[in-house]
Image: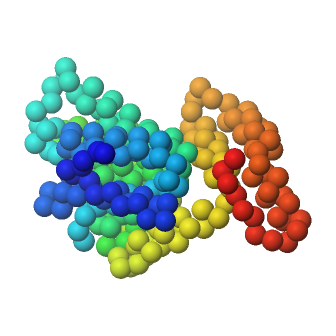
Amino acid sequence: MITYENLLLNLENGILTITVNRADKLNALNSATISEIKQAIQQVYEDTAVKGVIITGAGPKAFVAGADISEIAELSEVNARSFSERGQEVFSMIERCNKPVIAAINGFALGGGCELAMACHMRVASDNARLGLPEVSLGVLPGYGGTQRLTQLVGKGKAMEMAMTGDMIPAEEAKALGLVNHVVPQEELMSKCLQIMEKIRTKAPLAVGLVIDCVNAVFNKDENGYQTEANAFARLCASEDFVEGTNAFLEKRKPNFTGN
């Protein structure tokens, strides 16, 4: 059994909630927390009891308000690349996970926190949330994939503006830009995430996982996304859930998907 010092994990009805639990530091990501997130996501990959994930932050102020500046201040050119690549690896694990991952952004999502949220498949923000990549104020830039994912989500021009000015944007603007999917009052944040997750859980799990693969393929320069889609479509047509889903539709009943 893994013991976590910086995360709280709660599995209920197949939904694993991962809470970054450093409220006194506004849930800032240090190396230990990054390592724990990697362990937790590896657990998601391996545990068949986990059907979906919600990632959030402890307390009412912050999702994750950046990385631990005291650690960043100690970096040199010699170890900075490995520092960046390690975070990229962990966030790519989230992005590639074949189970849905939703970021419940309950406050500030800045720097590494914004990067963590963008690695999730969807983002739901409370109305007090603020998002941004302020790294240029420290003389660096986003190192956990932020320049890439922000551009994918909001487009080149706005990504350039946000990353070069370091400005924070409010939740409603983030929604208008496509950076977050929904904005709700803070007290409704987790219920909204659970509502979305429960809707996804009524669908075929294998199909949901392959949707994630296909959408991610759009941004993989080494992959033909159309071929990935065709391969996934063919694979699903050989699944038990395909038979169940089509039969249920024709018989006018709810399907009972098993993930096979």
Q: Position of residue 61 (x, y in %)?
A: 23, 68
- As drawn, the residue found furthest toward the top would be 78
* Residue 184 appears left or right of 28: right
* Residue 256 appears left or right of 78: right
Residue 6 in view in this figure: yes
**What is the quadrant of the N terminus in the image?**
top left
* Residue 163 appears left or right of 14: left
Compared to 85, does 41 lie above or below?
below
* Residue 236 appears left or right of 119: right
Q: Position of residue 232 (x, y in %)?
A: 72, 39
Q: Position of residue 209 (x, y in %)?
A: 61, 47
Q: How many marks?
A: 0
- Residue found at x 25% / y 64%: 58
Q: Position of residue 38 (x, y in %)?
A: 34, 40
In this picture the colour scheme is: rainbow
- As drawn, the residue found furthest toward the right would be 250
- Residue found at x 47% / y 61%: 15
- Residue found at x 66% / y 50%: 259
Viewer-closest of 177 and 228 = 228
> Dividing the picture into quarters, in which one does residue 253 lie?
bottom right
Residue 164 in view in this figure: no
- Residue found at x 33% / y 30%: 85
